[in-house]
Amino acid sequence: MAFLSKTLATIKRDAPITLNLPACVTHDFDPQVVNEVFRQVEFRTMLSRLQKLTNRQGSTSAQSGQQMSMFGDAVEAPTSPEPVTLAPYETIIVTTEAQLAELAEALNKATFIGFDTETTGLDKMAESLVGISLAVDGNCGYYIPVGHVPANAPAGTPLGVDPVAFQNPSHNGGPHQEDLLEGYTPDQLPLHQVIEAIRPALTNPNIGKVAHNANYDFVMLRRYGLEVTPMVFDTMIAEWLTNTSSRFLGLKDLAAQRLNVQMQKIEELIGTGKNQISFARVAIEKAAPYAVADAVVVLPLKEQLEEDLKQRDLRGLLDEMEMPLVPLLADIEMHGVLLDVPFLKTFGNELGERLAQLEDNIYLTCSYGKFNINSLPQLSDVLFGKLGLDTAGLKKTKKTKNFSLTADVLEDMRDQHPVIPLILEYRQVQKLRSTYVDALPALVNRYTGRVHTSFNITGTSTGRV
């Protein structure tokens, strides 16, 4: 085994490879041909760079099969592969009662409904609803804005539809008008009216519901009193079943890989870092195409993934195991865990007192005054420099070049000096306090008073959640 490992790790410098240097020279290229190669070999970063390059040098040449120059002008190409599609879905923004009625009629006639939600953040048990997107085919989708505010609304303006306020019968279902800038209130229907209009179709047992990462949208809509059923297909779970090591579990990546469709990234709308804004502040006319694409694209993805599942004899696993698990996990997540916060606060104070006692005892036992117990260089200096403890067999860290003082190392050194057990206890108490006793109360949901976990169905290749 050792020889095999050595062989596998050896770089073969005499491999029979013929290097054609002229073929390595930079030259013009057809972006569509390169795009297809990058997709096949799963070069996602290079795909992103290619898209930026083609956008910079002009979309006309990229979409007409022309050659792209690495440095500028385009020249004619002999062939024209299938171009990359930029999410070409028709978008209908629903802001009137007539449009809502037309949508409800279309939904009630559907065989399958693709759906998605837009929210103020990623925590499905803490964030608020901003909009709902729906689709009944792979060409057109509807976006219902319910919680948008003006981009220049004052700081502190409520974003999205607060789920607690929504339960109040007098609530209008959207951001309160008095909270918005006069003359800039986005045109939106009350969420109560929207929910009641789409409820018959989204709860019809004869109309299948399709989504990507359905658990998120299922929980979000359930918090507003809408139980989507039946959940028949989740494109993220289906992709994972076909390949548990898939790198395309994200909807944008999956659409690009399977449908050759480039979808808009959320960062293009809300920004990143300190300049990032809430989706609720994105203008409705800009938010709608993005949201609609999420609902529409799952329908053609469903058709393609169904064929793959059938070939692998996995459709039964999806229908009988994975999809029934979606609402079950939603039940567990939404129920949450009740914490005794007053007890944790008292316990935290007790642990703080114990840490103070341990610090004093450590300083007294070492007889070298105060030092930072959490500093590896200072602790190493005290143990090995001042106390002269044995360093035989100890390894140094690569970064600081100090002796490693992990819990295992200190356990082996326990009998060398009375301060070692004190340091071990100090670390244990500090870990208990910082990781659990102080941290858990901060995780309590402001709406439910409980801590809510999140289960990832596609997190492992073995099926564990």
Image (tube, grey):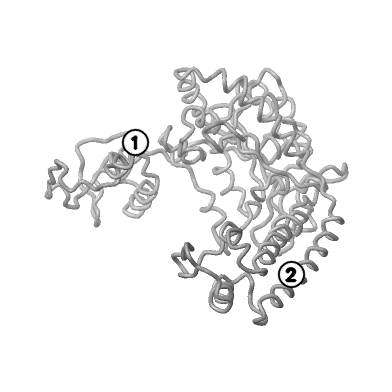
Rendered-image quadrant of the N terminus: top left
- Residue found 68% across the figure and 25% down from its top: 105
Above-or-below relation of 87 to 400: above
- Kind of residue indicated by mark 2: Leu
Q: Going by the image, does 115 lie left or right of 433?
A: left
- Residue found 76% across the figure and 51% down from its top: 175
Rendered-image quadrant of the C terminus: top right
Q: Secondary structure at mark 2?
A: helix
Residue 329, numbered label = none
- Residue found 55% across the figure and 27% down from its top: 137
- Kind of residue indicated by mark 1: Gln
**Mark 2 = which residue?**
358
Mark 1: few/some/many CA within 10 Å (<14, 14-19, 20+): few
**Mark 1 = which residue?**
40
Sequence-wise first label, 2 or 1: 1
Measuring from the top left, give residue 447's x and y in whole percent: 80, 48
The image shows a total of numbered marks equal to 2
Circles 2, 1 touching at the beta carbon (< 8 Å): no
Q: Quadrant of residue 82?
A: top left
Mark 2: few/some/many CA within 10 Å (<14, 14-19, 20+): some
Q: Nearer the viewer, residue 345 or 256?
A: 345
Q: Nearer the viewer, residue 397 or 270?
A: 397
Q: Going by the image, does 12 lie left or right of 381?
A: left
Measuring from the top left, give residue 316's x and y in whole percent: 56, 17
Q: Secondary structure at mark 1?
A: helix
Q: Quadrant of residue 2?
A: top left
Q: Quadrant of residue 94?
A: top right
Q: Residue furthest bottom?
A: 369
